[in-house]
Image (cartoon, helix red, strand yellow):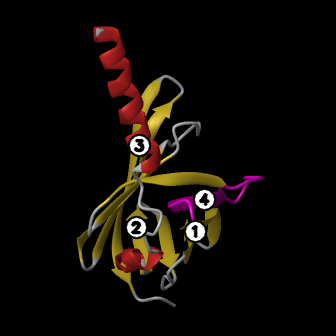
């Protein structure tokens, strides 16, 4: 009997994870991410540019430069595809998109997750102040837990 009750608890918990996401969430709820954000580390500069969101789509691009050369870039999207909110990333050298499903969302923070991705498995965005956006990628890289922080400051879009 204890086994059956335990099994029911596990099944209901899993159902809550799968079906608990609000499939009607509007991407426009993430308007606090829109704009241009910059992070400087030494002589490297990373800029993320996010367009104004619509109900179902927000486009972004990330570019890292060192001096006058680009060293990395990534095409980004946040979409509601009818199955919920997804963060979709495609680094410059990738052959395919990598989707991350929303795990949690508050008025000023969103966490996306893809447990099957090699690294990262989670992407976090949090508005700290109107001019300060904290982003983080985290998860296991091989057997090691790892996190990389991106403390962005709002800049004027060019």
Q: Which residue is situated farthest in the right direction here?
A: 95
Q: CA distance from mark 3 to mark 2?
A: 34 Å
Report which residue position mark 2 lands on.
39
Place of residue 122 in the rendered image (x, y in percent of width and height, measured from the top left)? 44, 46
Report which residue position mark 4 lands on.
89
Mark 1 vs mark 2: which is more N-terminal?
Answer: 2
Q: Is residue 141 visible?
A: yes
In this image, 4 relative to 53: left or right?
Answer: left
Nearest to the eye among marks 4 and 3: give it: 3
Residue at position x 58%, y 68% in the image: 77
Check whether the beta carbons of the residues at disc 1 and disc 3 lie within 8 A of each other: no
The quarter of the picture where residue 135 lies is bottom left
Residue 94 shown in magenta: yes
| SS at circle 3 | helix
Report which residue position mark 1 lands on.
77
Nearest to the eye among marks 3 and 2: give it: 3
Mark 3 vs mark 2: which is more N-terminal?
Answer: 3
Q: Quadrant of the N terminus?
A: top left
Check whether the beta carbons of the residues at disc 1 and disc 2 lie within 8 A of each other: no
């Amino acid at each position: 009997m204890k086994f059956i009750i335990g099994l029911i608890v596990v099944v209901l918990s899993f159902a809550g994870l799968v079906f608990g996401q609000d499939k009607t969430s509007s991407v426009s709820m993430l308007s606090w991410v829109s704009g241009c954000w910059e992070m400087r580390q030494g002589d490297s500069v990373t800029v993320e540019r996010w367009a104004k969101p619509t109900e179902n789509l927000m486009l972004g691009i990330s570019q890292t430069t060192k001096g006058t050369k680009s060293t990395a870039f990534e095409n980004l999207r946040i979409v509601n595809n009818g199955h919920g909110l997804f963060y979709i990333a495609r680094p410059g050298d990738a052959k395919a998109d990598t989707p991350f499903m929303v795990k949690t969302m508050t008025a000023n923070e969103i966490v996306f997750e893809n447990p099957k991705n090699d690294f990262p498995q989670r992407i976090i965005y949090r508005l700290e102040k109107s001019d300060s956006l904290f982003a983080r990628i985290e998860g296991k890289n091989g057997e090691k837990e790892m996190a990389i922080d991106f403390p962005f400051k709002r800049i004027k879009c060019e």
